[in-house]
Image (cartoon, helix red, strand yellow):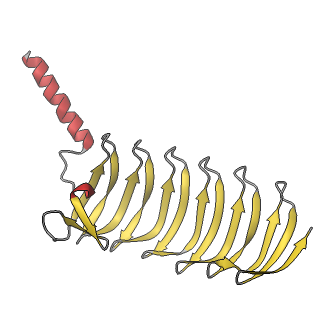
Amino acid sequence: MRHFSFVFAFAIFLFSINLGLLENFISLNDLLRENRIYYFKDNKDPVSGPVKTFWNNGYVENTGTLLDGLKVEDWEYFHDNGKLRAKGSYIKGKKNGNWLTFFNNGNMRSQEVYVEGVNSGVWKFYYQSGNIRTEEEYKNNNLEGIWRFYLESGELIESGYQKNGVRDGVLEIFDKSGDLIKKETWAMGILKEVELY
């Protein structure tokens, strides 16, 4: 009987290590959030330290670091099935650099670029199958630059440009075989001309 008790206690110990319960982490579930700043529920002092939060089923929900109540450095977020949901970095509570997001089947959902919380660069979005859906370019939080739309089977269907979040310039529309079937000319969201092929 004593041997069974020892084995049972050892198994519980190993299980708690696996869940990270013996590690010194802060759970976001134990904090309050106001204006992107995390506080302990007991007082209004901003929280600093490593964070690890768990889903009810025991899987990790997120890991990262808080400094003076703000998310900093690398963070990872997970679906409740344990698969990675998103990963990227923060500077003073704002997303920064390359961010990747994933569907709960593990396939890529998006590739995003931030500069201190501002949408920047070319973003790519994917179908749940993993195939590319759209590419769009941001400058200072505005859709500005290339815009491409693909069918789930991979064929490019539309290719054009945007300025201040609206279509601007030439938009080319293709059929499934890749042949150009229509060309539209836009000026700041207003359709000016259509050419059929």
> Which image quadrant is residue 197 in?
bottom right
Q: Residue furthest top?
A: 1
> Which image quadrant is residue 144 in?
bottom right
Could you tell whether 15 is left or right of 165 in the image?
Answer: left
Q: Residue furthest front?
A: 190
Could you tell whether 171 is left or right of 37 in the image?
Answer: right
Q: Residue at x 85, y 54 (%)?
A: 177
Q: Residue at x 84, y 72 (%)?
A: 183
Q: Residue furthest right?
A: 197
Residue 69, position in %: x, y? 24, 70
As drawn, 77 above or below 149:
above
Residue 40, position in %: x, y? 18, 64
Could you tell whether 6 is left or right of 172 in the image?
Answer: left
As drawn, 135 above or below 105:
below
Q: How many marks?
A: 0
Q: Residue furthest bottom?
A: 187
Q: Residue at x 43, y 71 (%)?
A: 96
Q: Closest to the observer: 14 or 152?
A: 152
Residue 88, position in %: x, y? 42, 62
Q: Closest to the observer: 54 or 166?
A: 166
Q: Closest to the observer: 19 or 44?
A: 44
Q: Residue at x 48, y 66 (%)?
A: 98
> Which image quadrant is residue 71 in?
bottom left
As drawn, 13 above or below 40:
above
As drawn, 168 above or below 172:
below
Residue 1, position in %: x, y? 8, 15
